[in-house]
Amino acid sequence: MPPPASVFDELAITAAERDALSRLRTVTEAVGGPMERHSLRCRHIAHELGRRRGWILDGEVLTVAAILHDAGLYPGVASRDAYVADGAALARALLTAHGWSPARIELCAHAIDRHHELRSQGGFGAEVEALRLADLVDVSGGLIRCGLERAWIAELRRTVPVDGLAGELVHKVGRALRERPLTLPRIFWRG
C-alpha cells in the first residue's frame, strides 16, 4: 500500500516544488505511485548523503530535481531525445516560470540530465552528485550503499515502499528502447 499522498506533499513546500510534484503526478497519472515514491526515496537518500559528507545542498533544487529526474520517461514530457534531457528541459521551463536564477535552473537541470552518469558529477554541483548517487542506491535496492548503512536504507524502504517500481521502470524504459533506442547510451555517458 502506498504511503499517504501527504508524505511528499509535506516535503514539497515551495511553489516550484509543488508545481513539479503536480507535474509528476499528471504525467504518471498517479498520486503516491511508484515513481513518486522513488523520487521521494531519492530525495531522502541524497539529503542524507549530503549531510554525512558535509555538502551544502540547496534543498529546493534537490527536491525539484528528485521529483522530475525520471519524468522524461512519460508521454507528455518525452520527445525524441534521451529521457534525462527531456526531464531537464521540463525543469528549465517549469523553473523559469517560477523566476529562478539561470544558475539555479541549470544546477537542477544538470542534476536531472546527469543522474545516470557513470563518473562523479560533483564538478557540476553537490546536488548533481547527490542525486546521481541516490538514484544508484535506490535503483540497486541498497546493494550499492555509498556509505549508508543497510539498516538506514531498509527503514527508508519500509517508510516509503518500493512496490511497483521495478514494473514501472521495465515498462517505461522498454518503451524508450522501442521508441528512441539510440538515445539510451546517452543517459550513461556523453563522451
Image (cartoon, helix red, strand yellow):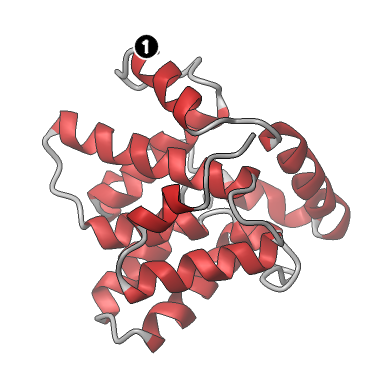
* Residue pictured at 21% horizontal, 57% vertical: 58
Residue ID at (19%, 51%): 57
- Identify the image quadrant of the N terminus: top right
Residue 121 at least partly seen = no
Residue situated furthest right in the rendering: 178
The one of 22 and 55 positioned closer to us in this rendering? 22
Which residue lies at the image location 53% right of the left edge and 73% below the top edge?
90
Q: Residue sitting at 69 percent across and 59 percent down?
A: 28
Which of the pair 20/56 is nearer the observer?
A: 20
Quarter location, residue 133: top left
Badge 1 crowding class, 10 Å Cα cut-off, few under 14, some 14 to 19, many 20 or more, is few
Q: Quadrant of residue 119?
A: top left
Residue 13 position in % (x across, y down): 31, 64
Q: Is residue 144 above or below residue 135?
A: above
Determine whether, in the image, residue 75 is placed left or right of residue 58.
Answer: right
Using the image, determine if residue 181 lies above or below residue 19: above
* Residue 61 image point, x, y percent: 30, 61
Examine the rendering and report whether any part of residue 98 can be seen.
Answer: yes
- Give the SS element for disc 1: helix
Question: Where's residue 101, x and y in %?
Answer: 24, 81
Residue 15 on image: x %, y %: 35, 76
Q: Amino acid at mark 1?
A: Ala
Instruction: Tell me how many marks there are.
Output: 1
Q: Which residue is mark 1?
A: 151
90 versus 49 height, above or below: below
Q: What residue occupies the far top of the structure in this picture?
A: 150
Q: Nearer the viewer, residue 59 or 11?
A: 11
